[in-house]
Amino acid sequence: MKLDSKYFDRIRTRRKAQQETAAEAPTCQWDGCDRPGVHRAPVGRNAEGQFFLFCFEHVKEYNKGYNYFSGLSDTEIARYQKEAITGHRPTWTVGVNKSAKHAPLHSTLRSGSAASNHRIKDPFGFVAEGRGAGPRMQPQARKLKTLEAKAFDTMGLAASANATEIKSRYKELVKKHHPDANGGDRGSEERFRAVIQAYQLLKQAGFC
């Protein structure tokens, strides 16, 4: 490889640029240090956006002892941390913000149902239903999964059975098919287990 190769020129250029950057860097602001200060360190509280310039060794030393809350009491520190949760913006408890009472929406909602109907769209008649007017919507029947439908069938119940009916039926079947009540009959024992499994499945699914 020739000494005047473009690769050697690139290496020489890079080293020269690094040397120029080091020469242009300000001096470390640590007392007695004359090395380049290329590492920033925060000045402190109430001086956000301002930084000291240190060399690598002294910025590490500075960061070890840096304390943003230096000079503050425990109460002031706790208040600052609490305010930081809301980004140091003012907050109000419900009913305390008096200016909200003059907002257009607040005055409209408190001016009666006639005025609120102009602001609130009610395409399904939920608001009207609450006032006793309009058609009442019937709740839709829950669509059963395969195992849930089988559990209802095992217990001899309709899918519309409520929690009280399910529990009552369960107690009745357990008492009827308990091994002690059937002299150890094998078929009754299997039926007993099937009823228990069906009830547990319905219970986990939220039916009872």
Image: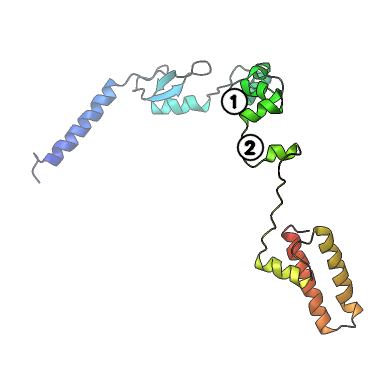
Residue type, numbered disc 2? Asp
Q: Answer with the quarter of the image where residue 127 lies.
A: top right
The answer to which of 124 and 47 lies nearer the viewer is 124
- Amino acid at the residue labelled 1: Ala
Q: Position of residue 150 (x, y in %)?
A: 71, 70
Q: Please give the residue where the numbered disc 2 appears in the rendered image.
A: 122
Task: Say if residue 94 shows up in the picture.
Answer: no
Dot 1 or dot 2: first in sequence order is 1
Q: How is the image coloured?
A: rainbow
* Residue at which label 1 appears: 84
Residue 207 lies, with reference to residue 93, above or below; the image says below
Residue 196 on image: x %, y %:
79, 69
Give residue 140's quadrant in the image: bottom right
The residue under the point 88% across, 69% down is 172
| Rendered view: 50 above or below 141 | above
Apparent side of residue 87 relative to residue 153 in the rendered image (left or right): left
Kindly state the secondary structure of the residue where label 1 is placed.
helix
Q: Quadrant of the C terminus?
A: bottom right
Farthest residue toward the front? 134
- Note whether residue 109 is visible: yes
Q: Position of residue 87 (x, y in %)?
A: 57, 25
Mark 2 element type? loop
Give above or below for 136 relative to 15: below
Left or right: 4 with respect to 50? left
Vertical order, 131 against 140 (above or below)? above
Label 1 close to label 2 by CB (< 8 Å): no
Q: Name the residue: 79% across, 79% down.
A: 190
Q: Give the CA separation, mark 1 to mark 2.
A: 40 Å
Crowding near the residue tagged with mark 2, few <14, some 14–19, many ≥20 C-alpha atoms within 10 Å = few
Say which residue appears at 68% left-offset and 40% top-offset.
Answer: 126
Question: Is 87 or 60 nearer to us in this picture?
Answer: 87
